[in-house]
Amino acid sequence: MSNDPLLQPYKLKHLTLRNRIMITSHEPAYPEDGMPKGRYRAYHVERAKAGVALTMTAGSASVARDSPPVFNNILAWKDEVVGWMKQMVDECHDHGAAVMIQLTHLGRRTRWDKGDWLPVVSPSHEREPSHRAFPKKMEDWDIARIIEDYADAAERMKAAGVDGVELEAYGHLIDQFWSPLTNTLDAPYGGDLDNRLRFGFDVLRAIRARVGDDFILGLRYTGDEMVEGGFTKAEGMELSHRLKNSGLVDYLNVIRGHIETDAALTDVIPVQGMKNAPHLDFAGEIRAATGFPTFHAAKIPDVATARHAIASGKLDMVGMTRAHMADPHIVRKIIEKREDDIRPCVGANYCLDRIYQGGLAFCLHNPATGREETMPHLIPAAAAKRRITIVGAGPAGVEAARVAAERGHEVTVFEAADQPGGQIRLTAQDERRREMTSIIAWRMAQCEKKGVKFHFNTFADADAVLATDPDEVIIATGGLPHVEVLKAGNDLVHSAWDILSGDVKPGSNVLIFDDAGDHAALQAADLISATGAAVEIVTPDRSFSPEVMAMNLVPYMRNLQKRNTTFTVTWRLMSVAREGNQLRAVLGSDYGDVTRERLVDQVIVNQGTRPLDDLYFDLKPQSRNLGEVDYEALSTGGAQGILRNPGGRFRVFRIGDAVAARNTHAAIYDALRLVKDL
C-alpha cells in the first residue's frame, strides 16, 4: 500500500472512503428540469471512474418551493428526483466512489420572481445585496414547514441510495438564523446564541429522526463570518463543539467568511492571483479544538497543498473541487505517479462566474468538463497516422497539437513569435493573472512528450505549409486588435494590447474606450492607474466589463477604486482630434443625439480582434473541404466528413480567434472537438 497521505483510506462511520480526496458540493448548473439527468450523471461518473473517494452533488439542492434556485439547481423537493439521483449514485458506486448531496433552503439568497413567484423568506427583512430580494420576515408556520421540508428532502435522498446528506449553512437560511446581522426574530428563534442556533439544530433533529442513526449527516458552515456585527469566531468555535456533542452530525465541513456580496464571496472562494488555501489553517483550528472529522475546500488547487492539508493533520478529507473540473483524473495520476501530467487549475473561475450569470459551469481550459457525453477527457488513438500541420501556438494551436499528438499523428507547428502563448502571454504580463501561463505550459509539456515539432520565429506562408505535405492543416493564427472604430482619429489611438505589451507607455490622463468588455481593458486600466495616472473607462454598455463577470471583477475593483479611476457607462467614443499636445475625445450616445467631450493625453481602444486569416484564404482553394466545416458534427461530437474538392491535397480548418474574436475557452474547445476525430 502507498504511504502517500492522500491515498490512505478514511473511515467515516460505517463508510470507508478509498482515499482522502473529495469533491465538495457544488452546482455546475447541469440539471434538466431540476433533475440530475445525463450531463449531470456523466460529469460525476467521470470523476468516480478516475478514483476520487467522495463526490458531492448539488451546491445546493433546494428543499422547498419557496427556495427557488437563482441558477439551475437540483430540486430536492420533488419526488421524481429520487429516480434520477439513484441512477447517478449507482453508477458512481460501481466505480468505487461514495456520493453525497448538499441540501439547503436559500432563504433570502434568491429572488421572488423565480420559480413559483413565492415570497423570499428570512429571519429578518434585510435584503441580500447580491440577489436584491426583500424577504418576508418568517412566521412560526414558515419555520415549521421548512423544517419538515428539510426532513422530506433528506428522506428522498436516502431512498435514492446516497451515502449521506450535507446541509449548507453559510449565507443560506440556516446561517441567516445564526448571524445577528440577518436575524431580528424574537425568542425562541432570535436573540441570544442559543436561540439563533435553535433552527439549525431543529432541522438536524428532524432529519436524523427521519433517516435514522446510521445515515451520514454533515454540515458545511461558516465558523467565522469575518464581518462587523456578524457571527464571530468565538461563536463559531462554540457551535463546532455543540455540533460534535449533539450526536446529530458525523463531520464538520468548515469555511470562513460571508457571501452576500461579490467581494465577500470571492474571499470565501478565491480566484487567481489570490492566496491559495486561505482558510486551511482556520479549518485546522476547528479540527484541533474538536477532535472531530473535518472537511474543507477553498482554493486548494494542487496536490502538494492537498497533501500538506492531510499530512499536517489539519483535515481528514480535502476538497479539490475546481481542480477536478480542470482535471477529473487527479487521483488516477497520483496513483500512477504522474502528478506532472495533471492539468492545473489556473483559478480563472470561468466555471463559477458562468453559473452566476445563468450559464453552465465550464472549465476555462478543459472543454470536456460538463460535456462528457460528447467530449473525451482521454484522447483515443487514431486508426491511421496522419501528418497534421498547425499554424499558430496560442491556446487553440497548442491544444490542437496536444490532441493530434495524443491521437498518434505526426504534428508540426509553426509560430511567428519566439515562444508559444498568443494572447495568454499578454494576459499573463499582469502578476495577478500569472497562473494563466500554466494553460500553455501544461500543453507544451504534453506536446514535448509526444514529439510535436515546433518551429518558432517562423512566419509560415502557404509554401512552408505545403512543404510539410500535410493531410490536415489547422489555422490557429489568432487575431490582431481592432482599433479602426472611430469616425475620425483612428491614427491617434492605441490598443489595450499596446499597453499590456509595454510597446506604449501609459499617459498621465487617459481615456480607455471599452467596447469589448473583457479583461484587456481592465488590465490596461490597472496598469495605467498604478502609475498615478487619471483613468476614465468609457463603455456604450449599460454596465462596464460584462465579459469579466462577477468574481473576477473583484480584484480589479479593489485596485482601481483606490486610484484616480472613473467608470462612465452608456457613452460611445466617436472621434479623437489633436489639440496642441493633447487629444480631444468626443463621446456620443446610442440613446439620443447628445455629445460630451474629454481633453486627455492618451486614448486606448479595446474592441476585440479581427482574424489574422490571410494564410487560411491562400490555402482554402487547394483543400479538399474548401475550408468548410460540418457544424452538425462539430456540435454533436461527430467527425468531419465534408468533401468539396476531391483533387485537394489536404483539408484546412480555422479555429479560435482566426475565425472570430471569442475567448480562451472557445479557442481550446474549437481545437478539441475538431481534432479529436482527425
Image (cartoon, helix red, strand yellow):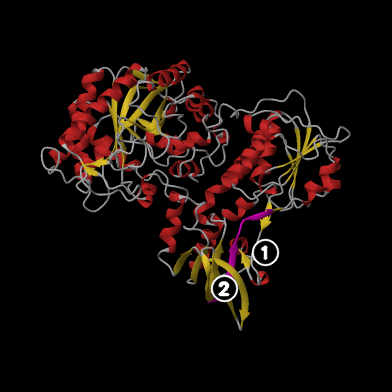
Left or right? Give the position of 481 relative to 618.
Answer: left
User: Badge 2 local density, few (<14 within 10 Å), some, or many (20+)?
Assistant: some
Magenta stretch: dominant secondary structure? strand
- Inspect the magenta stretch and tell me whether residue 606 lies in it: yes
Q: What element carries label 2?
A: strand
User: Badge 1 local density, few (<14 within 10 Å), some, or many (20+)?
Assistant: few
Q: In which quarter of the image is the C terminus?
A: top right
Q: Residue 484 has which mark? A: 1
Tag 1 or tag 2, which sits nearer the N-term?
1
Rendered view: 479 above or below 361: below
Q: Is residue 447 something one can see in this rendering? A: no
Residue depth check, mark 2 versus mark 1: number of the one nearer the observer: 2
Magenta stretch?
599-610
- Residue depicted at x 21% and y 29%: 145
- Inspect the magenta stretch and tell me whether residue 572 lies in it: no
The residue that label 2 is drawn on is 586
